[in-house]
Image (cartoon, rainbow, N blue to C red):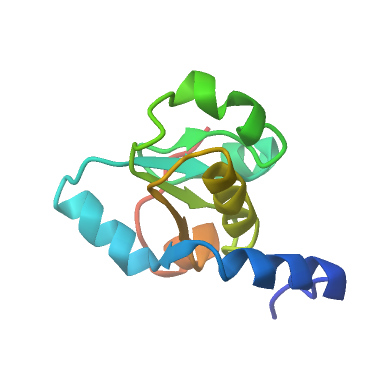
Amino acid sequence: MGKQHAPAFLKIVTEAKKHVKECTVADVKTRLDRKENFQIIDVREDREWEAGHLPGAIHLGKGIIERDIEKTIPDTAAPLILYCGGGFRSAMAAKNLQEMGYTNVISMDGGFSGWKNAGLPIEQG
């Protein structure tokens, strides 16, 4: 059974999702297989990252991404795919990055849970 999120949280997620582009886990896998040029960013908490993450991802947790994105990826046109546990936090982070001027940001719906449930490769640590 999925997490039961608070109504106020769901309200801001729903609003964020109206303003961001989303893709599926399968879309990201296809892009990786094609060796497309994009950066995967994991916005989960440190403990979630350490337990496992997508291959090649960088970690900029939801609490620091807005602070550190310009230093980590200064190109505001760089293609970015953000993910979290299920696609909620990544949608909110994507909206914030768009407001900061990033023009090619996508949130992966389904997140790490969807990736893992699809049996796709995971890196540890």
Task: Residue lying at the far bottom in this picture: please name it.
Answer: 1
Which residue is located at x 58 percent, y 58 percent?
91
Q: In the rendered view, does 67 fall on the left or right side of 59?
A: right
Please name whichever residue, 17 or 81, is drawn nearer the observer in this view of the structure: 17
Q: In the rendered view, does 47 fall on the left or right side of 119?
A: right
Which residue is located at x 51 percent, y 68 percent?
110
Please name whichever residue, 99 or 116, is drawn nearer the observer in this view of the structure: 99
101 is higher (above) or lower (below) than 75 = below
Q: How many marks?
A: 0
Residue 123 occupies quadrant: top left
Q: Could you tell me residue 117's position as x and y percent?
A: 46, 69
Please name whichever residue, 79 or 3, is drawn nearer the observer in this view of the structure: 79
Q: Could you tell me residue 80's position as x and y percent?
A: 39, 44
Q: Could you tell me residue 97's position as x and y percent?
A: 55, 43
Q: In the rendered view, does 121 fall on the left or right side of 22?
A: left
Which residue is located at x 48 percent, y 67 percent?
114
Q: In the rendered view, does 1 fall on the left or right side of 17?
A: right
Quarter of the image where the N terminus is located: bottom right
10 is higher (above) or lower (below) than 89 = below
113 is higher (above) or lower (below) than 35 = below
Residue 113 occupies quadrant: bottom right
